[in-house]
Image (cartoon, helix red, strand yellow):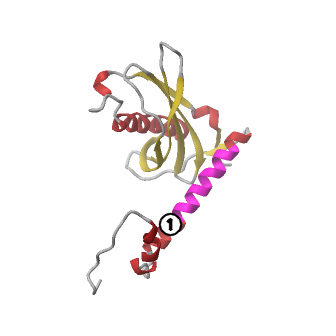
Amino acid sequence: MPNFKKVDSSRISLSELMKPSHSNFSGKIHGGYILSLMDNIAFACASKHSKAYCVTASVDTVDFLNPIEVGELITLKASVNYVGKTSMVVGIRVESENIQSGNKKHCNSSYFTMVAKDDNGKSIEVPGLILNDKNEVKRYLKALKRIETKKTRQAEFNHQDFSHHDYLDQLKDFNVRIELPDNF
């Protein structure tokens, strides 16, 4: 009988005060630092679900929506949105809060695909997922759609007959000028 776990059993949140050492040259919190925190929480969430060491296989749709200021408190929230045989998609939401005014803003959302590994580095099976509210069902379905879209795009781009000639007309509406040699 397969093993299943509720989404809530591996849901994690992490809060951290943003310091000047986390900022970039424009005084905002460096996106790379936020990505590092996101990778950490994705690892923790996936490992909690699978009870195994997990590695990051891919990161999809990293959208930086609002800058984070020095002195703000950020909260990262992570949950397993989808499980495959050995992989999990962890959805992450990042919010910042001005601790003086109490104003909150959504700063980032992303999806990390994590793979469970055994002590020898071999991928291992993960527990199934129990979905028990409509938001969890929506997140699972959206993850399926992202996976399907990614596979379709990869198949198109990796096909042996893929040719840039088939797409050149699409570039006329973009901010690009094509200057290819005649034999290209």
Residue sitting nearer the eye, 18 or 105: 105
Look at the picture and state if 25 lies above or below 179: above
Q: Position of residue 139 (x, y in %)?
A: 64, 45
Provide the residue span drawn in magenta: 137-151
Residue at image x 53%, y 47%? 88
Q: Position of residue 86 (x, y in %)?
A: 52, 52
Q: What is the count of numbered marks?
A: 1
Badge 1 element: helix
Q: Is residue 146 magenta?
A: yes
The majority secondary structure of the magenta stretch comes to helix
The residue beneath circle 1 is: 153
Look at the picture and state if 138 lies above or below 6: below
Q: Position of residue 149 (x, y in %)?
A: 56, 62
Q: Point out the residue furthest to the bottom here.
A: 183
Q: Is residue 17 magenta?
A: no
Residue sitting nearer the eye, 45 or 141: 141
Please rate how many residues cluster around mark 1, counting C-alpha atoms within 10 Å: few if below 14, some from 14 to 19, many from 20: few
Residue at image x 55%, y 38%? 49
Q: Point out the residue furthest to the top here.
A: 100
Give the quadrant of the C terminus: bottom left
Q: Position of residue 166 (x, y in %)?
A: 45, 80
Report the side of 31 relative to 96 (left or right): left
Q: Amino acid at mark 1?
A: Arg
